[in-house]
């Protein structure tokens, strides 16, 4: 991948691939806005997301785009725990409704001993 990175340490080549892939929130499927017009809800703003909360995992399988509302709600929670949160339950977000990249991350986490992929770190999710 190209050595240049954006403000969040994501290589330019990876950023391009993720931006082309994730037009809607990977969690709730809301169409996201790159810039939120004045007076519009911030919840539709596109943010950068580590699906598995480990900022060291900067791969096409872990870096994605989601809406501000989902990213804010998920915070440092593990993916599995967040999918059982009141936020997700009230919005009908679950392992069957999320984007394929999230389903793949869940499957990988289940196959990893002790769910090592589900570690959280002291670093917060990066936002656009």
Image: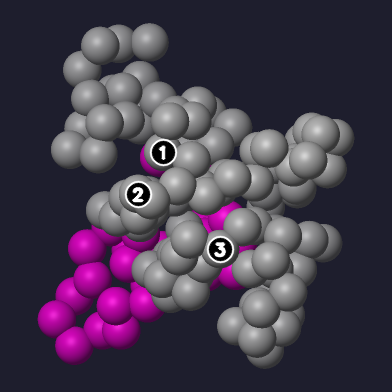
Do the residues under discs 3 and 1 have CB atoms within 8 angstroms? no
Please give the residue where the numbered disc 2 appears in the rendered image.
123
Indicate which disc, 3 or 2, sits on the residue closer to the N terminus.
3
- C-alpha distance separating marks 3 and 2: 12 Å
Query: Viewer-proximal residue, 85 or 3?
Result: 85
**Callout 2 secondary element:** loop
Mark 1, Cα crowd under 10 Å, few <14 / some 14-19 / many 20+, is: many
Q: Are marks 1 and 2 in contact (CB under 8 Å)?
A: yes
Determine whether label 3 and label 2 are within 8 Å by CB.
Answer: no
Q: Quadrant of residue 71?
A: bottom left
Check if residue 3 falls in the magenta segment: no
Q: Does residue 9 appear to the left or right of 67 in the view shown?
A: left
- Please tell me which of labels 3 and 1 falls first in the chain: 1
Magenta stretch: give its range.
19-46
Residue assigned mark 3:
77
Task: Answer left or right for 85 relative to 17.
Answer: right
Quadrant showing the N terminus: top left
The chief SS type of the magenta part is loop
Which labelled disc corresponds to residue 55?
Answer: 1
Q: Is residue 18 visible?
A: no
- Mark identifier at residue 84: none
């Amino acid at each position: 991948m190209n050595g240049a990175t954006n403000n969040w340490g994501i290589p330019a080549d990876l950023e391009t691939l993720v931006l082309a892939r994730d037009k809607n929130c990977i969690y709730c499927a809301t169409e996201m806005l790159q810039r939120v017009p004045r007076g519009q809800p911030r919840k539709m703003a596109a943010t950068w997301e580590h699906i598995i909360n480990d900022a060291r995992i900067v791969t096409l399988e872990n870096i994605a785009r989601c809406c501000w509302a989902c990213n804010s709600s998920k915070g440092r929670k593990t993916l599995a725990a967040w999918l059982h949160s009141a936020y997700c339950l009230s919005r009908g977000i679950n392992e069957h409704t999320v984007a394929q990249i999230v389903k793949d991350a869940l499957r990988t986490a289940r196959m990893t001993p002790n769910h090592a992929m589900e570690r959280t770190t002291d670093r917060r999710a990066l936002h656009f």
